[in-house]
Image (cartoon, grey):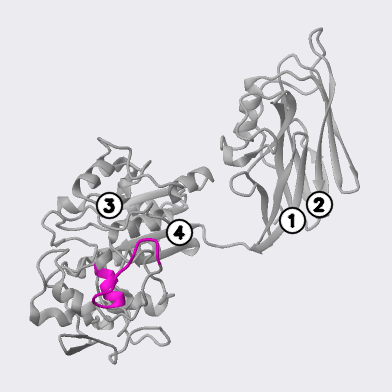
């Protein structure tokens, strides 16, 4: 359906203000250059003019068209004031990401001479309301454009939806003009809410290789590693919890992927990968504690009989999409890979941070948190007007109740909500958050066993993690949000388990 004109927020300054001895009417001209021949008409929204008190004006402004250019002329006085800028900002949702000025650096105006609304009608039947405002920058009269269809970050653009398609026009211009250049059109997504549940330390093959799901790319029982002259083959019946924690620091993963004796020089190409060192590493590494008992080193090659041992995961994997080539971002441990999820970067971190660093970042008594050069997804979403929410499963040991996302700069423990409120939150039809990230309980992290949590850490049973997956899925499945939601269940890294 075509867009409809939006409600205009004004102040008590009417159109056609009477001239005063200190005010002068001037011709204020702004042009909209339709470089793609997509606009059919531009019209003034009656009653939308907001002008500094005491300044004259003549409405409606004249709007003419010639050779692809719409010329809008408002006869009015010029006197900057905060109430006019406040009205403009209010109509733009008080969001600088929805306001754009191609000259003078853009940003949010503190004062404007006047502002008004126009409806832009497109030849495909769509119509959008935008707000035009005039102020000053660098001793020039300077124009702003804003509204719900305007996006000023990254590539400034105007976007609207019609007939289940999204149309995008790049914006540019000068202090007195706006250029509209058609960029692309794409299908409008029905997905309005994205939920991400990230669990701990299991490879795809460990969880799903022996699931029997057809057409997945996975290890088979012909795959093996050799250690001390003995071959160890992929097999089923993986233990519900491991006898010791497999290594997954950077050097552990280097050995697992490239074989014993492999080296890596910072900044150079990673060595060739043949996945030959998983057993050798599990049999010898002490990065996560004592080495595994000799009789148990074969466990690192074992995969779950998914249908019987992971019934929740199996049910979801057979009914929905499975990504069998989704790898962790960094060949290493939990912390940098979780940072990659939140920021597409770990800012150079390739190891598990010290307890002191974790304390400082999370509780922020001595730091502002872990800082990322380009910020996090939460910074980007906030800047673009996208709403988000964080949850953490607190049902478990105290040591497992600290959410890792709270280590990020700008995220505080108070921003992370108890998962006990999740059901009541999402069963509301007006759940306002477009992106939701959920963390498990990490179990007894203080002792290093991670027992009795819901993260599925290798030394803890997978049962509580299965229960957490089921709870999140069933809650969403029975909520009003289900038809417009995407649920992503993933793991931060492989945890040292074989990946073929």
Return the x and y of residue 438 as percentages of the image width and height: 34, 56
Q: Mark 2 and 1 residues: CB-CB less than 8 Å, in contact?
A: yes
Query: Which of the pair 5/99 is nearer the observer?
Result: 99
- Secondary structure under tag 1 reads strand
- Secondary structure under tag 3 reads helix
Q: Residue at 8% across / 76% down in the picture?
A: 293
Bounds of the magenta span? 252-268
Quarter in which the N terminus is drawn: bottom right
Q: Nearer the viewer, mark 3 or mark 1?
A: 1
Q: Mark 3 and 1 residues: CB-CB less than 8 Å, in contact?
A: no
Q: CA distance from mark 2 to mark 1?
A: 8 Å
Whichever of callouts 3 and 2 sits on the residue coming sooner in the sequence is 2
In the figure, is residue 148 to the left or right of 299? right
Q: CA distance from mark 3 to mark 4?
A: 19 Å
- Secondary structure under tag 4 reads strand
Please say if 270 is above or below 348.
below
Q: Nearer the viewer, mark 3 or mark 2?
A: 2
- Classify mark 1: residues with Cα within 10 Å, few (<14), some (14-19) or many (20+): some
**Residue annotated with mark 2:** 35
Return the x and y of residue 104 as percentages of the image width and height: 67, 32
Q: Is residue 157 magenta?
A: no
Q: Nearer the viewer, mark 2 or mark 4?
A: 2
Return the x and y of residue 316 as percentages of the image width and height: 36, 74
Q: Residue at 16% across / 82% down in the picture?
A: 298
In the figure, is residue 70 to the left or right of 456? right
In the figure, is residue 234 to the left or right of 102? left
């Amino acid at each position: 359906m075509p867009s409809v004109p939006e409600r205009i927020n004004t102040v008590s300054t009417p159109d056609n203000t009477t001239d005063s001895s200190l005010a002068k009417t001037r011709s204020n001209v702004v042009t909209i250059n339709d470089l793609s021949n997509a606009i059919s008409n531009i019209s003034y929204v009656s009653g939308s003019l907001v002008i500094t008190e005491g300044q004259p004006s003549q409405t409606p402004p004249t709007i003419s068209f010639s050779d692809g250019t719409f010329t809008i002329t408002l006869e009015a006085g010029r006197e900057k004031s905060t109430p006019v800028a406040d009205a403009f900002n209010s109509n733009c949702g008080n969001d600088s990401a929805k306001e754009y000025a191609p000259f003078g650096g853009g940003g949010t105006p503190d004062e404007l001479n006047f502002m008004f609304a126009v409806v832009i009608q497109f030849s495909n039947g769509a119509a959008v309301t935008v707000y035009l405002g005039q102020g000053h920058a660098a001793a020039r009269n300077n124009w702003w454009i804003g509204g719900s269809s305007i996006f000023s970050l990254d590539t400034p653009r105007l976007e609207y939806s019609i007939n289940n398609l999204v149309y995008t026009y790049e914006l540019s211009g000068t202090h007195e003009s706006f250029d509209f250049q058609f960029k692309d059109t794409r299908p409008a997504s029905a997905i309005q809410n994205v939920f991400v549940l990230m669990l701990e330390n299991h490879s795809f093959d460990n969880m799903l290789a022996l699931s029997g799901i057809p057409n997945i790319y996975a290890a088979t029982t012909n795959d093996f590693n050799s250690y001390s002259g003995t071959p160890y083959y992929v097999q089923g019946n993986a233990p519900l919890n491991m006898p010791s924690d497999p290594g997954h620091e950077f050097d552990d993963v280097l050995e697992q992927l490239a074989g014993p004796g492999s080296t890596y020089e910072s900044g150079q190409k990673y060595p060739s990968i043949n996945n030959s060192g998983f057993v050798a590493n599990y049999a010898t590494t002490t990065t996560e504690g004592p080495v595994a008992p000799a009789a148990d080193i074969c466990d690192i090659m074992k995969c779950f009989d998914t249908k019987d041992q992971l019934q929740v995961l199996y049910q979801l994997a057979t009914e929905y999409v499975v990504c069998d080539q989704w790898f962790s971002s960094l060949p290493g441990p939990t912390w940098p890979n979780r940072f990659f999820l939140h920021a597409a970067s770990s800012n150079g971190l390739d190891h598990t941070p010290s307890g002191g660093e974790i304390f400082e970042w999370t509780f922020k008594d001595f730091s502002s948190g872990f800082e990322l050069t380009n910020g996090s997804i939460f910074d980007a979403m906030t800047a673009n007007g996208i709403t988000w929410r964080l949850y953490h499963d607190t049902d478990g040991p105290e040591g497992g109740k600290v959410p890792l996302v709270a280590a990020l700069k700008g995220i505080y423990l108070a921003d992370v909500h108890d998962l006990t409120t999740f059901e009541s939150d999402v069963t509301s039809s007006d759940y306002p958050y477009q992106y939701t990230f959920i963390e498990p309980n990490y179990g007894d992290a203080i002792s290093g066993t991670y027992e009795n949590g819901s993260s599925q850490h290798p030394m803890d049973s997978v049962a509580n993690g299965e229960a957490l997956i089921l709870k999140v899925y069933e809650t969403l499945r029975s909520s009003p949000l289900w038809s417009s939601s995407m649920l992503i269940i993933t793991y931060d890294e492989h945890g040292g388990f074989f990946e073929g």
